[in-house]
Structure formats: C-alpha cells, structure tokens
Image (cartoon, rainbow, N blue to C red):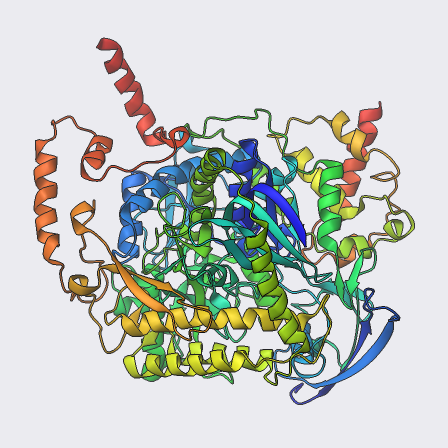
Amino acid sequence: MKLIYTDSLVVGAGLAGLRVAIASKERGLDTVVLSLIPAKRSHSAAAQGGMQASLGNTVKGMGDDEDVHFQDTVKGSDWGCDQEVARMFAHCAPKAVRELANWGVPWTRVTKGPREVVVNAQKVTIEEAEAAHGLINARDFGGTKKWRTCYTADGTGHSLLYAVDNKAISLDIPVHERIEALALIHDGTRCHGVVARCLITGELRAYIAKSTTIATGGYGRIYEVSTNAIICEGIGQALALETGVAKLGNMEAVQFHPTAIVPVGILTTEGCRGDGGLLRDKDGHRFMPDYEPEKKELASRDVVSRRMTEHIRKGQGVDSPYGPHLWLDITLLGRKHVETNLREVKEICENFLGIDPAKDWIPVRPTQHYSMGGIRTDATGQSPQLKGLFSVGEAACWDMHGFNRLGGNSLAETVVGGMIIGKYVADFCQQNTLEINTALVEKFVNQVRSEIDDLVEGQGSESAFDIKLEMQRIMMDYVGIFRNGPELQKAVDELQALLLRSRNIGLTCKKRHANPELVEALRVKRMLKVALTVACGAEARTESRGAHAREDFPQRNDKEWLNRTLSSWPSADATLPVLDYEQLDVMKMELPPGYRGYGINNAIAHPDTEKREQQISEILSQLPDDADRYARQHALMPFEVPPSLQEKNERLHDKSLSNRAQLGDEAK
Amino acid sequence: MSQGRTLTFNIFRYDPQEPGDKPKMVKYQLEEAPGMTVFIALNMLREKQDPSLQFDFVCRAGICGSCAMVINGYPTLACRTLTSKYPKGEITLMPLPGFELIGDLSVNTGKFMRELAERLKLWLHPRQDEIDIHRIEAPMAPEEAAKLYELDRCVECGVCVSACATKQMRDTFVGAVGMMKIARFELDSRDARSVEDFYHVIGNQDGVFGCMTLLGCQDNCPKDLPHMQQIAYLRRKMAGALV
C-alpha cells in the first residue's frame, strides 16, 4: 500500500482547487493537488464571459459596489442563498480581480472617450472617463443592475486558469495528474485524506492529509446533453456522499443555460447577450421583450431558459433533425466586435456549425450548465458533518447561489471562494495535527481494491456505458427545466432500478492499468447516487424557486420551503438518499424575501418576512444620521472574512469622496 | 449528403504497459451521423466496439487542448474535426509524436508542458511581489491588454511541438509553445524580467536560434497564433541583447 503524506490535499486542479493550494503553500504548508487531467485542461478554462466584481470602472458600472452585487446575487438566487456567504463573496470579489492582475491576467481595459455599444438592439455611444483609462473593464450580464463582469475577450476562464496555474507552478506546488480519487478516508467525524487510483498504471494510493479539499466541479454530466466538460461527472459530490456522514446541499438546483449550440451543447457565452445579442424565433421575431419587457434577453438565466422553452412549446421554435431550437443573433454587434470580444464564440460557430456568427444566426437551446448544489459546507468551506473535509467552487454548496446562479458569479466563486476558503484551510492545517491510523487507511484502500476486483474478475453482465446513457436520458426527460411530480417519481424509480443494475456491471476489458471501461464503471456507480440526490430533492421540493420549476407547484413558497435540502447516503446497500432540511432564518437576513422582478409576483410569504422588514427599518432608524453604507450593513447582518481580506475596497467614484473624507479626518 | 456513409478508421493501437504488446494499426468501421466529429466517433467506437481504446478528451469544444492527435497526417484537435471533412470516408488516427505515449492515442502532454514551464519559468514575474489588493489597480494600456490576450490564447495542445522538425531532431528544443509564452511575458509591462533574462533562457540553439523556420507550428496551430511573427520578433530582440 503506497501512502503519501501531506498537510493540505486538494482534489481537483481547476481554479478553485489551485487557489486553495496556493493559499496553503503560501502559509508554508506541504500541499498536493490531485487531478484527472493536466491542471490547465480543467473545465474552468471553458468559462468565457467573465467574472463579476464591483470595480465600477466603466461608466456603465458607476455607482456599483458590494451592496448592489450582494443584492443582485441574493435576488438571482431567489432568496435561496446564504446571505452571509453572498456578502463575504461580494466583498472579496474586487480583491480577487486585482490580485489576478498581478498574477498575469490580461484583463480587458477601459479606453477613455466615446465608445459605441449595443443596448436593447440600439447603437448607443457611451463616454468613458479619463480617470478610468487603463483600468479593468466590465461588460453587461444577465440579472445585474450594473455592468460588472470583468473579462478578457471571451476567454476569461482560460486566462484566469493559466495565470493561476502558472502561479502554482512558480510556488512549486505538485499536481499529481491522471489520478482519480475514489473514496474519502474518514473515521465518522474527521476526514483523513483519499484513496486514489492512477489512471495510467492503475496503482492504488492513499493520500493522508490534515485537510482534504474537494474542488472537482459540478455534476452536469449526469445529463446527456450538457455544456460541461466530459469530466464534470459529480465524482467529488459522490465521494462526500459515500462517507454516509457528509451531506450534499440543494442538489436539485441545476441551471440550464439559455444559449448552448444545437445539437452538441457547447456553450456560447452570456456575453453574447450582454454585449447586445438578441434571441429570435422561427419568424425572426425577437420574443424576449414579449415575456420580460424590462430585462428582456438579460433576465436571469433560469428565467430566459424557461421563456425559451415556453416559446418553443408554443410552436415558435425552428425545426431541426435534433428537435426545435431558437436563434441567437449577434450579427448586429458588427464583425469587429465579434472577432475581438467574442472570438471563441466565433471559433466554435465555425468549427462545430460551419457558420459565421458575424453574418449568420446561431442555433441555440437551453442546456444543462451549472450545479448550484454540491457538498454542503459552512462559511469557512468546511463540511459541518466531517471535520477536515473542505469543498470549494462548483463542487461545493457554500451557498452563494441558492437556486439560481448569476452569469459571471461562478468564475468569480472559484477565485474568490478559493481566496477566502484557502485561508481557512490553511488555518485548519496549522491548528490540527496529522492523524495517521494505518488500520483505517487500509480498510478504505481494501474497499476500493475489492470493488475493482469485483469488476475485473466478477461475472457481472451489465454494461457501464449503457447504464450511464440510460441515467443521462432519465435526467434529461424527467429532471429538466420544467418538472412535475409524476415524472420526478418516475425518475426516482428508474434511477433506483439502474442503481441496482449497476451492482452487476461486468467488464469486457480486464486490464487493471489504463482501462477506460473500468474508469467508466467506477464512475457510473457513483454518478447514479448523485443523480438520485438530484431527482429525490426535486421530487420532494413542492414549490418553484430559481432554476427548480415545478409545473404542479408554480409558486415560490417561502412559508414552507425557505430551506436548503440536505441529502446523505445512509449505508452502502441503500438505494435512496435520506433528505433533511436546513431552515433559512429570515430574522437574520439583510435582504428579506421579496419580488425578484420577473413574471407575476405570486410567492407565498414567510411569516417572519414582515416582522424582519419592520425590524430592519427600526435598526436603520436608530443609527446616527451620518452612518455610512458599511455601518448600515453591519447593523443588519454582520459577516466575517479572514483578517487580511477585511479592508474596504477602493473605487474610482469614491476616490474623490475619500479625498474629502480624509480632509475631514484631519480636521478632527 | 454525408448521412449514412460508412467511415473507416485506421487507429494506432499500442499499450506499452501490456507485456508482449506491439504497435499496430487496427481498422474499425462506423456509420457516419450528421455533424459527427472525431470525438463522437471515437466514443462510439469505445462504447460499441472496443472499450479498451485510449484517447483523451475534456472540453470537447476546442478550448482545453487535450485531444490533439495526427489525423490523416496532420496534427490537430480531434474534438472539432468533422468527419465530413474527409470525402473518402477514411480516417487514420495516430498519437501526437514528440510526447510520452500513454497508450493508443493518449500522450502525456501535461507532463511535457509542466516541465517546460518550470524550465523556462513561464509565469509572470511581477515588478512587485505584493500589491495592495484593496486599492485601485495599476492601469494598463488597453491595446497592450488586447495584444497580451492574443498571445495568451495558447491551449498547450502540443500540435506545434509535433509539427516541428527541429523538435523532432533536438529533444531539448523549446518549441513554438515555449517561445510563444516567452514572447507573451516579454511583452507584458508588468513582468520585471529584462531582455537579458529572456536571452539566458532562449537565446541559444534550444530556443530562437535553433528554429529552422519550417513553420509547421504556424501552419497547424489550432488557435491561429502568430508563431512566425513572434519567433522573428524574439530573434530580433535576442540578437539586440547581444550587441
């Protein structure tokens, strides 16, 4: 049995994982990152449009700050998020952007003077300030009050991932590539590392660590068509689930992106619409203003995806051999804009569709895109159930997204969450000792070994590939954009039957080293459990909130469902997860539940909402007249971030104010 | 038109870890579907015909650079190669040369790129190690940022390395990928390194003066990066450093 010891173990080498690894290494901790693939190939690279941070440099971002970013994020989440976490995030986002500039990210910058942009299908000229020249620019994204999405053309994720991985290389952080974690080592209260398999040699290793951080991304590939990379299979969530101790949060909260190309499901960025692109139907009609007259194409993602589906159901979709689709029109932005700011989109259109998006419309359809759910953590990123287990990024339910994530907030979460949680992980490693119990380690290694033995030597007759496809189709058919009780029940029943069949998987390729069929078999057994948490959570949640839209329960029901779904897996032979719920406390919210601004306001109110609103006005009225926005915020909902991240963020528009304030200070 | 064609794939098969296994070409046949890419075809072959077939895909969207292989003689990204591109319906797939073979079409580009990054120190060496992240960032000329992004688009797929005759003859040659990255940091006003610093790394036969200017890199780069221009630029710069 090969044992590898470290302080801080990170599973997953995308942006979130690397950022935590860097924070550990900077604290002088021994750090090891495990990855299925070379770090720079991680799915973070596919984020195109950008990351939200309230820098407020562009004229269309003037007046932006943490407060506005926080409010957009909470509304976007349909009040399902953890508001303290959303505050931590909004506060640290500008810091992460600025830090990344010093790590090499070539952020697109503001050019002073007049600039022509497309807003609501009209060309308008905006005038950028002299003082903003050369500062980091931002573009418009859905569901946001200000232009807040910082970007590098439409390759933001790529630029960030390369800069952050380069930083990790400069710090000599080892990334063990082509290593797959298959089980967490734990004693029921503390996590001690992972059992992992080398995808080249097949060797099993135990990595023993003080802290284990899961940063393996989302679980999009439990669906047949997804914008996600093919490695986003939810194995990180499954690792936590299979402990029987750690819990997953809000697994039913799955986002569908409005504009993936048909049929292959590759994403075209929200930046297309942010920069002025339109959605059109089979008649070329721009239909979004009919449904959402205010926000139009730039309503929140869940809203646009549902409106598109509604419109297709009315027969307004464009027929194709792959089913109906709609059009994304970016021709009005002009060739120069497409070829500079949307060039990855252009490449995708050329290579996969054979069209030129500067003159042709792009066939698009809502497609599975993001997992709001994940490993439930507290505000420091640690599992409340399993000490030493941390999770960050899309893998986690840190819960700044609730039931719908805003565009530009996921790339932001990777580096902002990684920056914050990285410090808490390092604290944990400094405060705790390495506990090595070789009998315990051996138990988990033997479990994985016998699982592999059974697959390779057993008499199983089921095909891992077939089972996976069946699972993916069930999720597509019954756990999609619109959901209802009977179909969700069907999904649960069929997934349960598949899970039983998956215990009888047999391999035709019997190799123990590099063997794609073995990899598939090990994964599909785990994916099925994750899929069941999604289907069961969706079946149980009899309301509509954010991306979880129940046709049979169309109202958001704060009275009964202002809570977070927690799922756990009771025992190895169980076929269903156990669900329980964590209440969201309205009396602690800075922003009590309200109207999100889309469609009719039909939410069923929580009894505390009115009480809290009253309390808030009382608290605010008791503050001195000169209380600034920070003091007001603090009075309503204090939140903590690590000491080195506490300072206020400086902005262009309060620089002149602060000059005045400084004069005032001196006068005192 | 291409619907219903039968495609013939000739695929390089070799498992270096299997005792007694020898490299060979194996023929597979497959019904073509509309919009089929080599990514789709290889997965169908693995699922339906031979589950031991090794290859690497991650994003399947031409973004991550995992899937470069030699397709009918040319190194390129398999995920975005449409089968309809080949009128005869015959497609020969070979692993990318110049990299450690893991098996079949899978090669270890990751290991190569990490070693290259360590050797050439391919990260930003900022003028100040610590900046105040709470204050307004230092401005950068918008044109510079745009230029940097253009050079930053490399996906480390390894195509330029496999298409490079110099690299095939000289194992220590840094290849177009190495030079492109050096050019990117050399251009970056935030980087503290001087021309002399870069000269130490690539001002030799393993770097800009080893390139025979055959420009297989320029011809095959899936991201259309301006390799020729950057190599010429670096040569001028490095030659300038000598005088």
**Where B211 sits versus A320, above or below?**
above
Nearer to us in this view, A609 or A293: A609
The image quadrant that residue B108 belongs to is: bottom right
**Can I make out residue A98 in this image?**
yes
Count numbered badges in the picture.
Answer: 0
**Where A333 sits versus A655, above or below?**
below
Quarter of the image with the N terminus of chain A in it = bottom right
In the orientation shown, which residue stands out farthest toward the right?
B169
Q: Is residue B188 left or right of residue A312?
A: right
In the orientation shown, which residue stands out farthest toward the top?
A667
Question: Residue shown at 69%/73% (left/top)?
Answer: B38
In the orientation shown, which residue stands out farthest toward the bottom?
B4
Q: Is residue A135 left or right of residue A77?
A: right
Question: Residue A255's x, y, as percent?
Answer: 39, 64
Q: Is residue B175 left or right of residue A194?
A: right
Question: Residue B3's x, y, as percent?
Answer: 64, 87
Nearer to us in this view, A574 or B116: A574
**Where B90 sits versus A585, above or below?**
below
Quarter of the image with the C terminus of chain A in it = top left
Nearer to us in this view, A581 or A171: A581
Question: Residue shown at 39%/36% (left/top)?
Answer: A57
**Can I make out residue B64 in this image?**
no
Question: Residue A428's x, y, as percent?
Answer: 45, 38
Nearer to us in this view, A210 or A473: A210
**Where A549 sits versus A97, above or below?**
below
The image quadrant that residue A294 belongs to is: bottom left
Question: Residue A355's x, y, as percent?
Answer: 57, 70
Question: Residue shown at 23%/54% (left/top)?
Answer: A584
Question: Residue shown at 61%/30% (left/top)?
Answer: B189
